[in-house]
Image (cartoon, grey):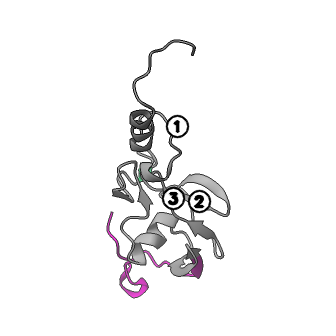
Amino acid sequence: MSPRLVPVESDSTGRRDRPLRITVDGEPADGVEGQTVAGVLLVSGRLAWREGPSGAGRGVFCGIGVCFDCLVTVNGDRDVRACRRRAVDGDVVHTQSRARTGLCPGTPGTQAASRAEAQAGPQTGEGE
Ligand code: FES
């Protein structure tokens, strides 16, 4: 997916752009009616807007709603695929993070859980 918008005057389809504005983590992002939230994010220069479990940035990967890499919160609805959701003027978008550093110590499989287990010492399995 290309992070650019073809100017209306050079688009042979005869489209008419109606501008819209959304906010992304409180920052305005401009787009045109018909664009997806991901399209507006890309045109505004954002290539990654979510953190995966490793903390690495995620954005559009498949662009067709299959990979779930582009998840955002839109108007309070979590886990919305930005590549599938049409942007509407006034939408309030928040980025999401699944980085493991912020999870509670008891979450299995996380570094925080490993540290908590190491601090607790060896477990005997008795009395549990
Ligand atoms: S980019 Fe793959 S689901 Fe949106």
Residue matched to label 3: 96
Q: Pointer 3: residues within 10 angstroms few (<14), some, or many (20+)?
A: some
Q: Which mark is residue 57?
A: none
Query: SS at mark 2?
Result: strand
Check disc 1 and report the residue beneath it. 106
Q: Left or right? Give the position of 6 relative to 31.
A: left
Taken as a whole, is the magenta stretch helix, strand or loop?
Answer: loop
Q: Of the two numbered discs 1 and 3 on the same chain, state the one appearing first in sequence.
A: 3
The type of residue carrying mark 1 is Gly
**Residue 73 bears which disc, if any?**
2
x and y percent of residue 17 in the render?
Answer: 53, 81
* Label located before the other in sequence (3 or 2): 2
User: Image quadrant of residue 127?
Assistant: top right
Residue contact at pointers 3 and 2, CB within 8 angstroms: yes
| 22 displayed left or right of 118 | right
Mark 3, secondary structure of its residue: strand
Magenta range is 1-22
Up-down relation of residue 113 to residue 16 (above or below) = above
Q: How many marks?
A: 3
Q: Nearer the viewer, residue 17 or 65?
A: 65
Q: Nearer the viewer, residue 58 or 32?
A: 58
- The answer to whether 35 is drawn above or below residue 70 in the figure is below
Mark 2 belongs to which amino acid? Thr
- Whether residue 4 sits left or right of residue 107 in the image: it is left
The residue that appears at 57% across and 63% down in the rendered structure is 86
Q: Amino acid at mark 3?
A: Gln
- Report, in whole angstroms, how far the alpha carbon at label 1 lies from the one at label 2: 25 Å
Residue for point 47% across, 33% down: 108
